[in-house]
């Protein structure tokens, strides 16, 4: 879950997907970043390494858990703790939304999310009415 929310990784980039996407291993994790090889669309990209991804967590890689089991765990946890329907992909969306909410440039978010189109990344721009009013008042 840490890699989904704090690195924006897809579930398949963490546990692998059949013969198309290799699972994440220690060799892909560097001091400040994680190299994702052959992600969606067979594209490589680099994402930030979560500060909380410590040595103990690294020693668990590669994770030996079926995608569906991890997905089910996140869904059940969301219902139990948040009383909401969520998926692992919701964590990834949280990553993009959090970056946008912190004012990170859209092209940076696009690169970190691995989107080929900027309009795909645009979904993370949520209008904040209070902030919009304050910004407009500053202009005049």
Image (cartoon, rainbow, N blue to C red):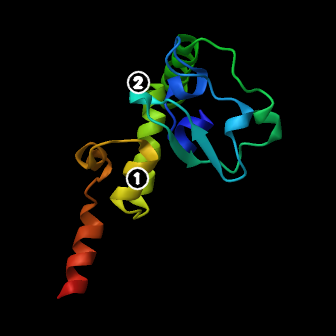
Q: Position of residue 36 (x, y in %)?
A: 56, 36
Q: Is residue 38 left or right of residue 23?
A: left
Q: Position of residue 100 (x, y in %)?
A: 38, 56
Quadrant in the rendering for residue 86? top left
Q: Does dot 1 land on a helix, a strand or a loop?
A: helix
Quadrant in the rendering for residue 102? bottom left
* Classed neighbour count for the residue bearing mark 2: other residues with Cα under 10 Å, few (<14), some (14–19), many (≥20): few
Question: Which numbered disc covers residue 55?
Answer: none
Q: Where is residue 137 in the image (x, y as percent from the top left)?
A: 21, 82
The residue that appears at 59% across and 37% down in the rendered structure is 3
Q: Does dot 2 land on a helix, a strand or a loop?
A: loop
Q: Is residue 27 left or right of residue 34?
A: right
Question: Which numbered disc covers residue 109?
Answer: 1
- Foreground mark, 1 or 2, reads 1
Residue 49 seen: no
Q: Name the residue under label 2.
A: 85
Residue 38 seen: yes
Q: Front-most of 80 and 22?
A: 22
The answer to whether the residues at label 1 and label 2 have Cβ atoms under 8 Å apart is no
The residue that appears at 40% across and 24% down in the rendered structure is 85
Picture quarter with the N terminus: top right
């Amino acid at each position: 879950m840490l890699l989904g929310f704090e690195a924006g990784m897809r579930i398949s980039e963490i546990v692998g997907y059949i013969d198309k996407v290799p699972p994440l291993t220690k060799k892909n994790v560097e001091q400040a970043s994680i190299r994702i090889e052959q992600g969606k669309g067979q594209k490589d990209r680099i994402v930030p390494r979560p500060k909380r991804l410590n040595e103990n967590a690294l020693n668990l890689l590669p994770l030996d858990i079926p995608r569906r089991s991890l997905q089910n765990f996140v869904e059940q946890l969301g219902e139990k703790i948040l009383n909401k329907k969520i998926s692992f992909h919701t964590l990834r969306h949280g990553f993009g939304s959090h970056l946008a909410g912190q004012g990170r440039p859209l092209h940076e978010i696009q690169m970190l999310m691995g989107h080929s189109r900027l309009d795909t990344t645009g979904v993370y721009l949520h209008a904040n009415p209070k902030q919009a009013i304050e910004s407009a008042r500053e202009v005049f």
